[in-house]
Image: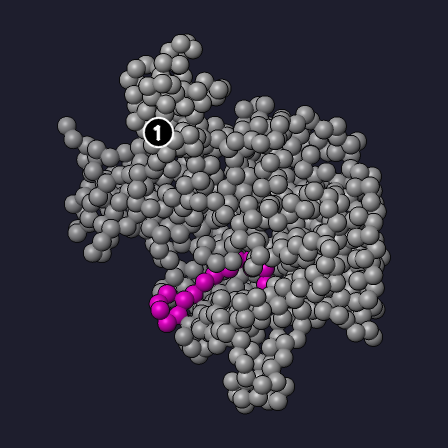
């Protein structure tokens, strides 16, 4: 007897908040998390099964049936389905878009998922006499047999192709003769480095491990605040090994793909092939292979950026978030969420520990320590016993700068290079020059699509907008008045690189920014002179400020940090402190004493003075007191509604509707409303943006308001003329 059909709800990758109902035949498995091909409009779309209703089909008219199921078993477990539902509810995001965010990119296509194991061929018993007879009659078979005989684990298709491009027919013949056997094996990463033994932990590291180890079977948030070079990674490794010995798995998140290769090699050298990676520099197939191997338990550790948090497994025992303060963990487009906070929720749901680590923890994390929600552990000494360099201010208020560099900085660079040291210069502005203008009429190179100036990239002779990517050739004369007195001002990393190459012609000058580094492999290749301990100068942006361990850097110079002193961004002082301490911490990690120089035109500014005098904890305490006085996060919760539209008036009108909805709901008086107002950058990519923010002292107040507000807001459909986005706990107001 055939099974009755069910009415099932499916989530589609669409910016809508409701689910879609379809008929599911009783012969199909009704398991949440399975992918199905669904009829949609005049075509078909991929959907994820969320729930089933066994009620009779007669109560639903004109309901369509699913086309087919794509999975034998759910790609998303019940745990991840619950986590996605929580994320969608907390961050006010459409459930369909959230669920598709949880899938590896390859699984977002309406296709059957490929296997991730690879075929390999190994040799059977072949005596030397037979091998010699094959050599004279079939040289290609002989070459393949010889290679297989030398291989301990057999060869796969890629390796056989390196022996002969046309390897298929010889291998088929050898299989038919019984000289070769075919099998399957896991496509795990090959490890170049030899496996390293455990390092002896310092007493401080050992104490942290001893304190956390007994608590690895329960949910707790452990925050490790350790100065740069204090060996936080060794603590992670020690605890990871304990979790793996118990048959559990680990998710390890880092903020940037630039950190992944170096860290991946370190983890693999300690843990072996148990470690796989996942980040945007990998192909969709490579990321799916890592996801599948972690899901099946073949890999015990997955290391990656934000999206690696959603890796599927039934044996997750620990989550680690390195550089937890980093803004890269916040997804700024599409599905908007903070990976650190979602990771904490996932750990809580699974009753497992989570470890956050940073030399400069976020203000939110320090606040949670003070509220006893997090447990704090400190590493105040470097493993090498060297002291972190004290920050020295270089007063540039009364002296001319040469391409952004003061005479004192250039002299210090020369001294450290002469002593066989390496130098890191931090300038968080890529390109050649940030301002191009006409001396006659004052014309500036503004973007045609954004309220922003275009940056000169002299290597391609173009003006490029760093917000939308729009570019034009550098004009020979002023577009407004026709004068030829066009000049550029300010310094970017490209100009600084060229200047240093002229100043130090015998020294490698290595620029690291998004223009010069296109992939993780490219990054590793450019950093080879640094690893070889050659005297060199590193010039770079934020990519150099995060987690890299290069022990031969003895001097760090920081250029043009003053812009943060007068920024309208309320987190500017927090970011400046974190960046300065992170960058300065790259110096003096080995036997050479480190020096950190901070150029400023405002050496008497209180923040600049405090950077030299106070510890990070003291600096953060002052920020917390300021935030408390003005009622900013973490002492308030914020939700921002932003509309981008073809006209500013239309964006403001849409937000006026949101504000009117607010006035109609109960408890609206418990929240503070700011706006609607034009966004700080009002025009971006040819569209106009406005925003409205609501603030509340308690999360209960803002959640109560959102529960009543969201059903009304969902009626404001996105169109080509206007799009509404919602950010819960945004990084900016």
Q: Nearer the viewer, residue 513 or 259?
A: 513
**Going by the image, does 565 lie left or right of 271?**
right
Whole-percent x, y for residue 549 in the image:
70, 44
Whole-percent x, y for residue 99 in the image:
40, 46
| The quadrant where residue 301 appears | top right
Is 239 drawn above or below residue 391 in the view shown? above
Q: Nearer the viewer, residue 110 or 331?
A: 110
Q: Nearer the viewer, residue 99 or 460?
A: 460
At horizontal 48% and vertical 33% (from top left) the residue drawn is 294
At horizontal 62% and vertical 27% (from top left) the residue drawn is 194
| The quadrant where residue 225 appears | top right
Q: Is residue 121 visible?
A: no
Whole-percent x, y for residue 497 in the image:
67, 61
Which region shows up in magenta? 718-733
At horizontal 16% and vertical 45% (from top left) the residue drawn is 58
Crowding at dot 1, Cα within 10 Å, few <14 / some 14-19 / many 20+, comes out as: some
The verdict on residue 318 being magenta is no
Display colour scheme:
one colour
**Going by the image, does 226 lie left or right of 701?**
right
At horizontal 82% and vertical 52% (from top left) the residue drawn is 418
In the picture as drawn, the residue positioned furthest to the front comes out as 136
**Going by the image, does 51 lie left or right of 395?**
left
Q: Is residue 84 visible?
A: yes
Which quadrant is home to the C terminus?
bottom right
Q: Which residue is mark 1?
A: 167
Whole-percent x, y for residue 172 in the image:
30, 23
Which quadrant is home to the N terminus?
top left
In what element is the residue under mark 1?
loop
The verdict on residue 721 being magenta is yes
Is 107 drawn above or below residue 613 in the view shown? above
């Amino acid at each position: 007897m055939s099974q009755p059909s069910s009415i099932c709800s499916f989530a589609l990758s669409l910016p809508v908040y409701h689910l879609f109902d379809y008929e599911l035949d009783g012969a199909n498995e009704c398991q949440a998390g399975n992918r199905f091909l669904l009829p949609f409009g005049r075509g078909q779309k991929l959907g994820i099964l969320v729930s089933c209703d066994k009620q009779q089909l007669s109560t639903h008219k004109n309901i369509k049936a699913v086309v087919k199921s794509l999975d034998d078993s759910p790609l998303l477990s019940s745990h991840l389905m619950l986590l996605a539902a929580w994320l969608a509810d907390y961050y006010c995001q459409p459930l369909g878009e959230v669920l598709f965010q949880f899938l590896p990119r390859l699984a977002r296509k309406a296709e059957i998922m490929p296997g991730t194991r690879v075929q390999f061929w190994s040799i059977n018993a072949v005596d030397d006499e037979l091998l010699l007879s094959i050599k004279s009659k079939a040289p290609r078979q002989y070459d393949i047999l010889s290679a297989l005989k030398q291989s301990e684990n057999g060869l796969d298709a890629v390796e056989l192709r390196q022996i002969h491009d046309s390897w298929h027919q010889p291998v088929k013949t050898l299989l038919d003769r019984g000289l070769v056997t075919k099998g399957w094996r896991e496509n795990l990463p090959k490890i170049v480095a030899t496996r390293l033994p455990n390092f002896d932990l310092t007493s401080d590291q050992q104490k942290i491990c001893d304190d956390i180890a007994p608590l690895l079977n329960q949910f707790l948030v452990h925050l490790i605040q350790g100065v740069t070079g204090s060996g936080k990674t060794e603590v992670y490794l020690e605890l990871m090994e304990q979790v793996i010995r118990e048959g559990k798995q680990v998710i390890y998140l880092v903020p940037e793909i630039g950190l992944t290769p170096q860290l991946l090699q370190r983890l693999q050298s300690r843990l072996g092939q148990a470690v796989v990676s996942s980040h945007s520099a990998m192909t969709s197939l490579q990321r799916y292979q890592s996801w599948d191997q972690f899901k099946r338990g073949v890999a015990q550790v997955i290391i990656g950026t934000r999206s690696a948090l959603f890796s599927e497994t039934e044996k997750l025992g620990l989550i680690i978030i390195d550089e937890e303060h980093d803004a890269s963990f916040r997804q700024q487009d599409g599905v908007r969420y903070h990976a650190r906070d979602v990771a904490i929720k996932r750990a809580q749901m699974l009753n497992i520990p989570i470890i956050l680590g940073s030399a400069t923890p976020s203000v939110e994390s320090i606040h949670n320590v003070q509220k006893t929600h997090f447990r704090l552990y400190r590493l105040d000494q470097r493993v090498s016993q060297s002291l972190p360099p004290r920050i020295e201010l270089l007063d540039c208020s009364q002296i001319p700068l040469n391409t952004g560099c003061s005479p004192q900085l250039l002299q210090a660079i020369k001294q450290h290079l002469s002593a066989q040291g390496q130098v890191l210069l931090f300038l968080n502005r890529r390109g050649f020059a940030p301002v191009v203008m006409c001396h006659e009429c004052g014309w500036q190179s503004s973007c045609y699509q954004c309220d922003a100036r275009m940056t000169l990239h002299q290597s391609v002779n173009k003006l490029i907008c760093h917000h939308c990517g729009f570019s034009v050739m550098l004009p020979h004369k002023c577009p407004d008045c026709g004068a030829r007195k066009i000049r550029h001002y300010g310094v970017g990393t490209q100009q600084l690189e060229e200047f240093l190459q002229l100043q130090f012609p015998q020294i490698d000058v290595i620029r690291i920014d998004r223009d010069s580094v296109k992939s993780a492999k490219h990054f590793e290749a450019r950093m080879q002179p640094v690893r070889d301990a050659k005297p060199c100068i590193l010039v770079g942006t934020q990519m150099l400020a995060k987690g890299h361990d290069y022990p031969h850097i003895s001097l760090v110079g920081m250029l043009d940090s003053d812009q943060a002193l007068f920024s309208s961004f309320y987190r500017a002082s927090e970011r400046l402190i974190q960046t300065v301490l992170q960058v300065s911490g790259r110096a003096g990690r080995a036997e050479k004493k480190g020096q950190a120089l901070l150029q400023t035109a405002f050496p008497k500014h209180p923040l600049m003075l405090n950077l030299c005098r106070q510890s990070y904890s003291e600096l953060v305490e002052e920020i917390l007191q300021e935030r408390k006085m003005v009622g900013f996060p973490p002492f308030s919760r914020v939700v921002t509604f932003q509309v981008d539209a073809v006209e500013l008036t239309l964006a403001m009108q849409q937000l006026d509707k949101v504000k009117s909805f607010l006035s109609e709901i109960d408890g609206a008086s418990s929240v503070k409303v700011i706006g609607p107002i034009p966004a700080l950058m009002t025009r971006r990519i040819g569209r106009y943006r406005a925003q409205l923010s609501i603030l509340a002292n308690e999360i209960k107040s803002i959640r109560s308001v959102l529960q009543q507000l969201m059903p009304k807001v969902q009626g404001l459909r996105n169109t080509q003329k206007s799009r509404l986005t919602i950010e819960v706990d945004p990084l900016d107001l």
